[in-house]
Amino acid sequence: MLNTQTILQQLSDQGFKKTKVRELLIGELLKLKKPLDAQALQDFLSDQKLAVNKTTVYRELQFLLERGIIVEINFGDNKRRYEIAGLAHHHHLICNNCQGVEDVFVDQDLVKLEKKIAKEKNFAIHSHSLEFFGLCRHCL
C-alpha cells in the first residue's frame, strides 16, 4: 500500500532529500485521492502555515512527475491536475456544475477494446484517458 513515508523512503534511497513541501504534497494527494491543481496544492500548503511561492510548487510537482510519483491529468480545460501514480487504474466523473471529481472503475471490456483498436489500427497504445462529464447527484 502506498503511503507518504514509503514514497519518501524510495526518494531517499535514490539520493533525494526529504523536504517538508514534498512530504505535505504527497500526503495530501494520497489522502484526498483525487486530482488537484497547483493552486489547490499551494492553498493547502498555506493552510499548513507553509509559505511557498507558485514557482516552488511547480518545481516540486515537476520533480515528482519526473520520478513517476505523480501523474498529470487534464480534463480538457487546459488546467493541469495531479494525482498519485500507481493507484488502481481508474477514470473520472467530472461535474460540469460544481467541478467535483469522482473516481470510476471500468470493467475489463475496456482493455479488450483497447487491444482491438491497437490491432486494427496497427497502433502502439501507451496509455489512454477516459473522462465522463455531466452533473453529479448533488447538482442534478
Image: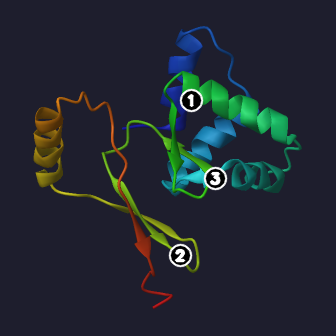
In the rendered image, residue 85, in percent from the top left (x then y), is placed at 44, 37
* Residue drawn where x is 64% and y is 25% of the image: 63
Question: Label 2 near label 1: C-beta < 8 Å?
Answer: no
> What residue is shown with label 1?
65
Q: How far is mark 1 from mark 3, CA to CA?
A: 16 Å
Q: Quadrant of residue 106?
A: bottom left
Image height of 25 relative to 35, above or below: above
Q: Secondary structure at mark 1?
A: helix
> What residue is shown with label 2?
96
Q: How far is mark 1 from mark 2, CA to CA?
A: 27 Å
In this view of the protein, which residue sits in the foreground, 124 or 138?
124
* Residue drawn where x is 61% and y is 8% of the image: 15
Q: Quadrant of residue 62?
A: top right
Earlier in the chain: of badge 1 and badge 3, it is: 1
- Left or right: 91 with respect to 58? left
- Left or right: 99 with respect to 24? left
Question: Label 3 near label 2: C-beta < 8 Å?
Answer: no
Q: Secondary structure at mark 2?
A: loop
Mark 1: which amino acid?
Leu
> What residue is shown with label 3?
79
